[in-house]
Every structure is written in structure tokens, then in C-alpha cells.
Image (tube, rainbow, N blue to C red):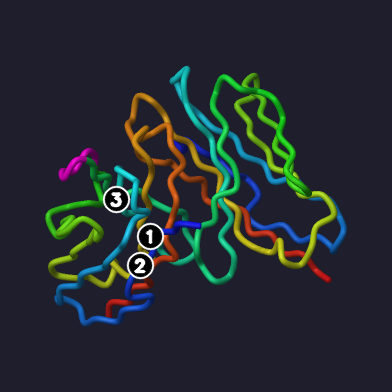
Amino acid sequence: AQKVTQAQTEISVVEKEDVTLDCVYETRDTTYYLFWYKQPPSGELVFLIRRNSFDEQNEISGRYSWNFQKSTSSFNFTITASQVVDSAVYFCALSETITGNQFYFGTGTSLTVIP
Amino acid sequence: EPEVTQTPSHQVTQMGQEVILRCVPISNHLYFYWYRQILGQKVEFLVSFYNNEISEKSEIFDDQFSVERPDGSNFTLKIRSTKLEDSAMYFCASSGGGGRWETQYFGPGTRLLVL
């Protein structure tokens, strides 16, 4: 079973539109961490955010915001006023206590921002 | 800002050949990881390394794979006899002393092509 599900395979938006990328996770752990990484066309993985399971406060960083809802096991990522440079594949990842140090990645959402 | 580096950026090899992928983790980090990403697919965990030994490994990390920290700075992944299905992007990552609680910072990847 997938521990991290990113149901949106590809999304296209027009520049300046807002877009939300969904992430649903599955864990039996009570203590865990969630992450978002960005993979631009150049291929590297860029860390965006880490959130622990005890902190459900939403976070905003510039045009980026994250909505963590334990009740629905979701950790969604919103880009406000999207720009062409936001075009990338975005991965959500989970780190659990019970399964050690590895990250479980979702399958990624490919975002294309059209100028 | 400290970063993880990987060499080479691209490697082409013949099936059956041995390859060594090199990584220099962030200098004060204690946990080291290898992940792979087959083209267009999600990032998959291979192995984690701490205190000069493997701490976890996935099913993918079979006897063909080995890791080593030959000196105080490098972390290598060796594939003894490459197969076509080993073609992928290989990412090295490192994290601080908190292990699973720490953000893993990824290198730019080595794209391996096995012919």
C-alpha cells in the first residue's frame, strides 16, 4: 500500500493562478514528519518544508503555504500567484518513527505554469 | 550554504560493468542515504548509513549494491554488475544527528544509463 499518495499526476495552470497540490499519507505512527520537495527540470531535489505530526498550524512562506490536517491525513501545498519558475515536479514525503530513517515519497505532481 | 555534491553528473556504462557513484555529504551531517528514481517514477529509498555501517536498506538494495565511507568526506554507492534496470537517477542525501527527525538534503543526482 502506498504510504504517500499524490493523486494529481499533472496539473497545468496559467501564470498568476493559485494552485493546490494534494498529498494524502498513511501511517500508524503517532510521531512522524512530512516533507515537500521540488524537482525542477534540472533534476535536483530541493527541500521546501518539514512538518512534524504534532504541529498542525498552517505555514506560509512567501507565495507558498501548507495545510496540514491530521483528521484527513493530508498535507496539501498551495502556490499563490503561480509563476513559470514554479514549473516542476513536486514530491510529498513521509518519515515515520517505526520504519526508521527512510523517506517514503509520493509519485509526484508535475506542475506546468503557462505564461 | 552547505550542500550535498555528487559526481559524476552522468554516467554511461555497459551491462555487467561495475560503477561507483560518489557523494560528498554536508560536512557536519551524520546520516547518509542513497535513493534512486527511475525515469518518470517516484523516488525510492535504497539504503541509509550511520556510524560507518548500514542502518537500513530496502529490498532494492541487494547483493549487487554496496556502500562505503572510505574517508571523512566521501560516501559511495557501488553497483557490482550493472543491469539494464539499474538505469536511473541516483540521489545521495544527508541529515544531521537526529536521523529520521532531520530534514534530508539531497544532492543533484547522478544519472546512470546502462546499455
Instruction: Tell me how far mark 2 sits from mark 3, CA to CA.
Output: 16 Å
For the residue pair A41 and B60, the one nearer the viewer reads as: A41
**Tag 2 and tag 3, C-beta contact below 8 Å:** no
Instruction: Tell me how far mark 3 sits from mark 1, CA to CA.
Output: 10 Å
Q: Quadrant of the C terminus of chain A?
A: bottom right
**In this image, B12 relative to A93: left or right?**
left
Residue range of the region highlighted in magenta in the rendering = B51-56
**Residue A31: percent from the left, percent from the top?**
46, 21
Residues flagged by tags 1 and 2 on a common chain:
yes
| Chain under disc 1 | B
Mark 2 secondary-structure assignment: strand
Q: Read off the residue under disc 2.
A: B6
- The quarter of the displayed image where residue A110 is located: bottom right
Q: Is residue A83 above or below residue A32?
A: below
Q: Earlier in the sequence, mark 1 or mark 2?
A: 2
Question: Farthest right residue?
Answer: A16
Instruction: Tell me how far mark 1 sits from mark 2, CA to CA.
Output: 8 Å
**In this image, A97 relative to A15: left or right?**
left
Q: Name the dominant secondary structure of the magenta segment.
A: strand
Local crowd at mark 1 within 10 Å, few (<14), some, or many (≥20)?
many
Q: Read off the residue under disc 3.
A: B46
- Mark nearest the camera among 3 and 1 is 1
Q: Read off the residue under disc 1.
A: B91
**Residue B80: percent from the left, percent from the top?**
13, 67
Q: Amino acid at mark 1?
A: Phe
Q: Earlier in the sequence, mark 3 or mark 1?
A: 3
**Tag 1 and tag 2, C-beta contact below 8 Å:** yes
Q: Amino acid at mark 3?
A: Leu
Question: Residue at (24%, 45%) from the top-left corner?
Answer: B49
